[in-house]
Amino acid sequence: LGRGTALALRLLAALPLPGRGSIPVAERAQVAWAPLYRLTDAVALQAPTSAPYVGYRADLCSLVANLAFRDGAAADAIASAGGAELLLAQARVDEEAPMAREWALWGVRNLTESSEVAHERLRGLDAIQPQSDPELSKRGISVELRPDGKPALRHTDQG
């Protein structure tokens, strides 16, 4: 993994997840891309823990996505460092970076096109719990996980 690619992944990992608010810095090491993010790295790099400008997250996602495009060695290195999970985590709507979701999905596509490592890492992911959505709740719908781990929509009495 080149130093520039590793830097881009660390900068992306230092940001809170899009659309959820901030994850406390101490808890970020517990997520899937833990090898990328260490508090000492963020302090040493002076990595911003919030986007310094609109589109910052999208710019980082586009950089990683383009580095992985039809380059098996780069895709393997990015995936081995946890970049596939990190990009997948960016695939949420973010008002501060409107194109980040599309770049993240393009990056996951590029990684999985060229890297069996990315395939294996993403295949190993399991749903933990569904994310509640205020819009669905207003309409009387909730999301639950079935015993097989797949999401299911349920109508609630509220609505």
Image (cartoon, rainbow, N blue to C red):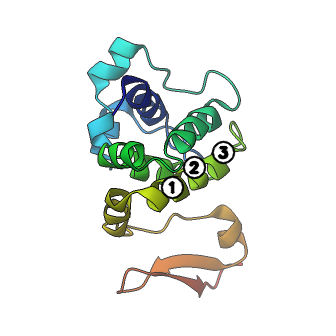
Please state which of residues 6 and 44 is positioned toward the viewer in this rendering. 6
Residue 87 relative to residue 73: left or right: right
Query: Nearer the observer, disc 3 or disc 2?
Result: 2
Q: Quick check: 37 above or below 87?
A: above
Q: CA distance from mark 2 to mark 1?
A: 6 Å
Query: Nearer the observer, disc 1 or disc 3?
Result: 1
Q: Position of residue 84 (x, y in %)?
A: 42, 52
Could you tell me which residue is drawn at 31 percent across and 64 percent down?
A: 120
User: Where's the N terminus, which quadrant?
Assistant: top left
Kind of residue sitting beneath label 3: Asp
Q: Which residue is mark 3?
A: 94
Q: Secondary structure at mark 1?
A: helix
Kind of residue sitting beneath label 1: Val
Are the residues tagged 2 and 1 within 8 Å (C-beta)?
Answer: yes
Could you tell me which residue is drawn at 51 percent across and 51 percent down?
A: 70
Q: Which residue is mark 2?
A: 104
Could you tell me which residue is drawn at 30 percent across and 47 percent down?
A: 80
